[in-house]
Amino acid sequence: MTASALTRPGERERLSTKVAEIDWRLVALICVISGSGIAMLYSIAGSEWRPWALNQLIRFCGMLVVMLGLALVHPRWWFRAAYPLYGVLLFLVLLIEFTPLGYEPVGAGAKNWLNLGFIRIQPAEFIKIGLVLALARWYHTHTAEEARWHWKLVFPAAMIGIPFLLIAKQPDLGSAMIIGLTGAAVMFMAGLHWGVIATVAGAAVAFIPPFVMFVMHDYQRNRVLTFLNPEKDPSGTGYNLIQSKIALGSGGLLGKGYGLGSQSQLEFLPERHTDFIFSTVGEEVGFIGSCFLLACYAGVILIALRIASLSHSHFGRIGAAGMTAFFALFVLINGAMVMGLAPVVGVPMPLLSYGGSSMMTVMIGFGFVLSTRVHRYTELPKGQGLF
């Protein structure tokens, strides 16, 4: 459909027109990935719908409706909600840190959940959405020169730095890493000067050794050292990584067969339904099946970036690219983690791993991406924002 057709008076508000403009290729790939995750959860539970597969199916169906509903929301509402949403989510992170409402689930290793009585949520997941929208709004209302290098960049830097530090202190290193890298990706895509990028990257590399030795908790430091040499403690800190590699390697080219993975079925593989579910995929459907799934992830990322590039609104371009960035970071970090190319930091494989908070974050993010696609010819005012 042409731009003129979409911009005729009243045409944009027709529900049928908006539904037709949804990128159904993206929706289909999301369904394929989530369906694969549900199938794997069914398999590793011994071909039983409980305790994981049925819950995941219900969550996905509900969030699919939410995602498609959000796709029809006009960008001006996303724009108006950006700063308030970020502020509310940051407040929830602060509640975890400074009130008794924050708690640590058994075995989680971090006090990163908030008990509000009627609901329990993980603000570190949702603040990724608020951060991307807030950064997109800030860059929408500032010039390209200010985005390249200007004292005003202290504001987006603070938007990234405050939740990063609070969540790292919980300590939830995985979520903090995603937040920091997502913020850095948005600033890069917005046009940050290469000299600044090189300086910050160099400082970050120089800071890694003292950070590992003097700032990290003991169990986090052990994870890093285990990543470098997992065989040093095969029955302790290196166990997870070694079992993950065994599962991936034993699958071979075509896998052992659906429901026949020994590492997952016999529970040698830890967290096989969450952080290490991709290892189960490699064991049961092999290299070919794993590559197919990674190709689906690549398709989602490429389509979403294409949607971002076609938006007439700078807010839409930056926002959609930012949502795609944190999704891509989930995939890259989890994939590297289960293959022994990165330390185990508790980052799930998006849409594949069991869990409600992660799925909600990703589906809401893609709701915004699809909204950007549906309203790609919409232009928002360039007036000065809050900062």
Image: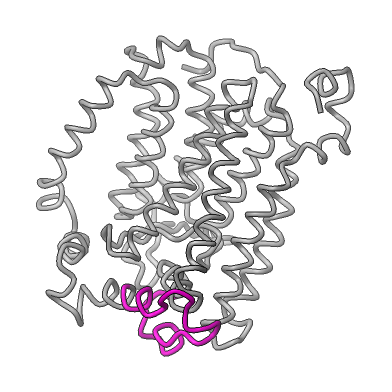
Name the residue at 44% across, 57% down. 101
In the picture as drawn, the residue positioned furthest to the front comes out as: 253
Residue 314 at x, y percent in the picture: 57, 21
What percent of the width, then of the height, locates residue 203? 17, 32
Judging depth in this view, the residue of 161 and 270 nearest the camera is 270
Relative to 224, is 75 above or below?
A: above
Quadrant in which residue 243 is drawn:
bottom left
Q: How many marks?
A: 0
Residue 211 lies left or right of residue 75; in this view the side is left
250 within the magenta span:
yes
Of residues 302 and 138, the one drawn nearer to the viewer in this rendering: 302
Q: Quadrant of residue 22?
A: top right
**Residue at the image position 38 percent from the left and 22 percent from the top:** 155
Left-right relation of 196 to 107: left
Q: Identify the residue shown where x is 47% and y is 40%.
A: 325
Q: Position of residue 199 (x, y in %)?
A: 20, 26
Left or right of 187, for residue 369? right
Residue 261 or residue 370, whichever sits in front: 261
The secondary structure that most of the magenta stretch takes on is: loop
The residue stretch that appears in magenta = 245-272
- Horizontal and vertical percent for residue 129? 52, 41
- Left or right: where 384 falls relative to 78: left
Was residue 218 drawn as part of the magenta stretch in this picture?
no
Identify the residue shown where x is 68% and y is 68%.
Answer: 58
Check the picture and name the quadrant holding the N terminus.
top right
- Indicate how the structure is coloured in the image: one colour
In which quarter of the view is residue 158 placed? top left
Image vertical order of residue 208 relative to residue 156, above or below:
below
